Image: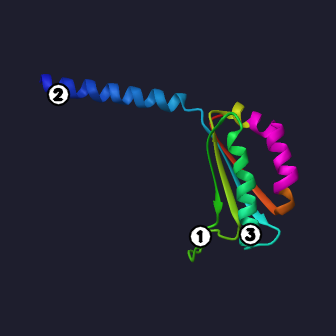
Amino acid sequence: MQKLLTILLFTGLLFTNFNAQAQTDQRVSHVVVVWLKEPGNAQMREKFIAASRALETIPGVISRHVSAVIPSNRPKVDDTFDVAVTVTFKNAAALKKYMQSHKHKNMLKEKLKPLVNRVVVYNFGKQ
């Protein structure tokens, strides 16, 4: 009986800790899918990736990944884009600050937008 009570107590504590972590997780993800002006151009992809990496140092960024598309034969996989960027922020306020930063705005205007034909952005997480 004591063993059963210990297991139940441990399970309850584990669930409480998991639930508390889920409630405090404020992370927000910012996903940018990019079609370049010259689709499939490896040099343009690398130029975009290299320039984009400079944005990793903006405050509020937890993690950032930028890379070229992985071609796929699966019909449900959209591999028509060239490059995608995923950035994770501590919270929605950090995303807002990032979007308003001069470094971000200047990088977009001067180095990234000249390479880009089309962009689709997805933001998701806790508001």
**Which residue position holds label 1?**
76
Of 111 and 117, the residue lying toward us:
111
Discs 1, 2 touching: Cβ within 8 Å: no
Front position among marks 3 and 1 = 3
Relative placement, left or right, of 24 versus 59 is left
Colour convention of the picture: rainbow
User: Measured from the top left, where is residue 20 in percent x and y?
Assistant: 46, 26
Question: Where does the magenta region start and end?
Answer: 96-112
Q: Residues within 10 Å of mark 3 (few under 14, many from 20)?
A: few
- The residue that appears at 17% across and 27% down in the rendered structure is 4
Q: Is residue 109 magenta?
A: yes
Label of residue 43 in the image: 3
Dot in front, 2 or 3: 3
Q: Give the alpha-carbon distance from disc 2 to disc 3, as whole Å.
A: 63 Å
Q: Main secondary structure of the magenta part?
A: helix
Q: Position of residue 72 (x, y in %)?
A: 58, 73
**Gap between marks 1 and 2, in whole Å?**
48 Å
* Earlier sequence position, callout 3 versus callout 1: 3
Q: Which residue is mark 2?
A: 4
Q: Residue at x 32, y 26 (%)?
A: 12
Q: Tell me the quarter of the image containing the C terminus.
A: top right
Residue in the picture at 74% in, 69% down: 43
Which image quadrant for residue 55?
top right
Residue 38, by quadrant, is bottom right
Residue type at tag 2: Leu
- Gap between marks 3 and 1 measured at Cα: 27 Å
- Per the image, label 3 sits on a secondary structure element best described as helix
- The verdict on residue 68 being magenta is no
Q: Is residue 47 above or below residue 19?
A: below
Q: Is residue 103 above or below residue 66?
A: above
